[in-house]
Amino acid sequence: MGYRSEVKAVFYAPQEKWAALKLYVDENFPTVGDLIKDEDLKEFDTGIYCGYLFEQDDVKWYPNYAEVIAFTDFTRAFLELAEGENAEALDWNYEFVRLGENYDDIETVQSDGCVYLLDVRREIEVNFSLKEGA
């Protein structure tokens, strides 16, 4: 079994800066092992921003796994470009959220110029459909 998490990340830029970001991600995004697969990375276009959405549900996201190390190394290099000396020219952004099984286990990372495409919400549901004896 193991401890499970839900992981989502977005890498994006304004539409006019999309080509450079696409080239970088296509050439550098890690596809090592079984944890990170091509189908987990999908292109999106909001009409303002274009980018990639990476998502995995019910995953063992352990920091010592080779795939997680490769993903972390990629995002570190991505952020160095996004926030480095050419940051204004590139206009790249990154957001990451990992929700663990425990209520207070939330990890978030955002680039400086992000527009918060990822949002974490906690909701309380009321279930009045319980029946006697259940």
Image (tube, rainbow, N blue to C red):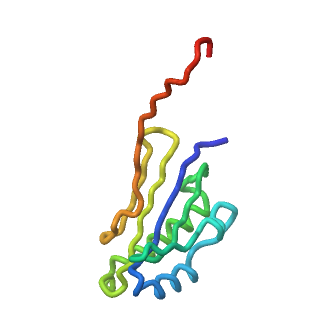
Residue 38: x and y, percent?
65, 70
- The C terminus lies in which quarter of the figure? top right
Determine the residue located farthest toward the top in the rendered image. Answer: 133
Residue 108 falls in image quadrant? bottom left
Q: Is residue 24 left or right of residue 112?
A: right
Rendered position, 40 above or below 123: below
Residue 89: x and y, percent?
33, 87
Q: Is residue 96 left or right of residue 3?
A: left
Determine the residue located farthest toward the right in the rendered image. Answer: 34
Taking the spot 47% from the left edge, 82% from the top edge, the residue there is 21
Q: Is residue 79 left or right of residue 44?
A: left
Count of numbered circles on the image: 0
Nearer to us in this view, 71 or 8:
8
- The N terminus lies in which quarter of the figure? top right
Residue 52: x and y, percent?
51, 72
Residue 109 falls in image quadrant? bottom left
Nearer to us in this view, 134 or 119:
134
Taking the spot 68% from the left edge, 65% from the top edge, the residue there is 33
Residue 84: x and y, percent?
33, 80
Taking the spot 52% from the left edge, 41% from the top edge, the residue there is 101
Rendered position, 8 above or below 76: above
